[in-house]
Image (tube, rainbow, N blue to C red):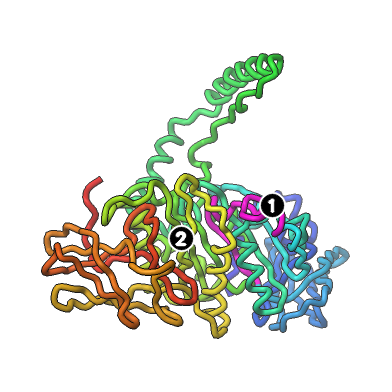
Amino acid sequence: MKLKFVLSGLLLLGMTGLAELKLPALFSDGMVLQRDQQVAVWGWADPGADVVVSFAGQQKSVKANPDGTFLVRLDTMKASADPRPLAVRAGTDAVEVKNVLVGEVWLCSGQSNMQMAVAAADNFKAEQAAANHPLIRMFTTVRNASPEPLADCRGSWSVCTPESVGGFSAAGYFFGREIQQALGVPVGLIHSSWGGTCIEAWSPLESLAPYPLAMKTKAGYDAGARKFSAAAEEERFAKVHAQWQEKAKTATANGKAAPREPQRRVNPRLNQNYPANLYNAMIHPLVPYGMRGAIWYQGERNAKTYASAMEYRALLENLVTRWRADWNDEFPFYAVQLVNYKAPQTKPVENSAWACIRDSFLNFHKEVPHAGIAVAIDVGMEKNIHPTNKQAVGFRLARQALAKTYGLDVVPGGPIYRSMKKDGDKIVVAFDDIGAGLVAQGGAPLKRFAIAGADRNFVEAKAVIAGDTVVVGSDQVADPVAVRYAWADNPVGCNLFNKDGFPASPFRTDDWAPAAE
């Protein structure tokens, strides 16, 4: 049994806390325990204390370790909407967690598009009024970064109500709502995200050694840390803050808004984007809490260069592999492929890091077991990196889970490129996940297909649905070798869908390296 999760970081809790019974923040009123798993219950007590955990007729006993840690596992349980207490006793100390349900638990992580709240999503007033879901419970991990793995985090559970839903992750909530309604069991959502952060920050540090760009990022932060002076920063901050106070006073006197208050700079080693810092503070403390799987909305930060976008495929699998190792569970993992964004497409193919990272997501979907992506190429916004239609994002993530994790007879998503075959002066493209069949959404013709010969010069192509395939050609290319679809930052009008309403993922049939940046 892996106990590293609860044994590390104890000094960061403070030595005075070791003498009293304490449970992690996740074990608080309103929590949801994962059904059909031997879920872990852990915490801290007096070294050698006899610890007894009681829940739903079960009673498990263990002696606290010499360092004060303890862990027991409950027998598997069926889903239950009956709110019951979980009691933990160690000597004369006792803790009772109230209103505990049993159902499905999912981790919701990533950067700002996962962090984006329900209050910022489409139709919030209507969504808020309808958000009376006592069987949905929401936990948000307080943002924190740490250079060392922590044993606990801060946060608390809340029951989903119109009053509580607005501040929770929109993608997470709409995903959880679909899961709860489809399965009819309690759902617990653990939200742990931070806007503007890179995937390296969410990955264990030792796992990043094989990745040159990740190590280059680390080296840059380390160089900055060596030059950082806390005393010099205090001197600088005192000066700029005094200047700000004067400007704020003047602005207020003139009836104007005060300028933004300056912030202290932190040691780069403590930055939230330093490799592993968010894993240490916002993922490690959650292990080994019982859960069904994870959803992920991140990648924008890693889509700044071709190199980083193309390395993302390996980094994403690395993250999933390491998280699964921590939980000792090959749990499912579903990610959101980056949406359409920026200026609308004007050329047949527009190479960009944003397009390349979508390809990394697509290959992840096709190649990593128990994983998948929600394609969102039709819900983006030209001038807003945070699309407000999070309902579609949550629904599509949920359909991946309902089909692949829970085995429901539903279509998991849209067409996924499978293979190509040359047929004279045309290329025939085949797909998986065609559902009820392929369709040109909004009517023919299909748009945003491009084709190229050996010269790698892509031109706009004519694409026609032929049964379960798409036949692509152009009078300008007599001997085609490659096809691309929706290959641009914002391929407005791309309209290959299945009849079930899901868009096809952008794809390419070639493996040509992008032009130098």
Side of 242 where 185 appears, left or right: right
In the rendered structure, which amino acid carries the disc numbered 1?
A: Gly
Is 491 included in the stretch rendered in magenta? no
Quadrant in which the C terminus appears: top left
On the question of residue 431 being in view, the answer is: yes
Question: Quadrant location of residue 240?
Answer: top right
Q: In the picture shown, does residue 53 fall above or below 9?
A: below
Q: Position of residue 215 (x, y in %)?
A: 37, 50
**Residue at 57% over, 53% down:** 388
Side of 414 where 286 appears, left or right: right
In the rendered structure, which amino acid carries the disc numbered 2?
A: Asp
On the question of residue 45 being in view, the answer is: no
Q: Nearer the viewer, residue 54 or 62?
A: 54
Q: Give neighbour class at mark 2: few <14, some 14-19, many 20+ (Cα, 10 Å).
A: many
Side of 58 where 141 appears, left or right: left
The magenta region covers: 105-127
Q: Position of residue 367 (x, y in %)?
A: 37, 73
- Label 1: state its secondary structure: helix
**Residue at 61% over, 48% down:** 144
**Marks 2 and 1 close (CB-CB < 8 Å):** no
- Label 2: state its secondary structure: loop
**Residue at 48% over, 57% down:** 203
Q: Nearer the viewer, mark 2 or mark 1?
A: 2
Question: Quadrant location of residue 424?
Answer: bottom left
Which disc is residue 167 wearing?
A: 1
The mark that comes first in sequence, 2 or 1, is 1
Q: Give the labeled residue for mark 2.
A: 378
Q: Position of residue 179 (x, y in %)?
A: 63, 73
Q: CA distance from mark 2 to mark 1?
A: 25 Å
Q: In the picture shown, does residue 262 fall above or below 337?
A: above
Q: Position of residue 290 (x, y in %)?
A: 64, 72
Q: Nearer the viewer, residue 150 or 462?
A: 462
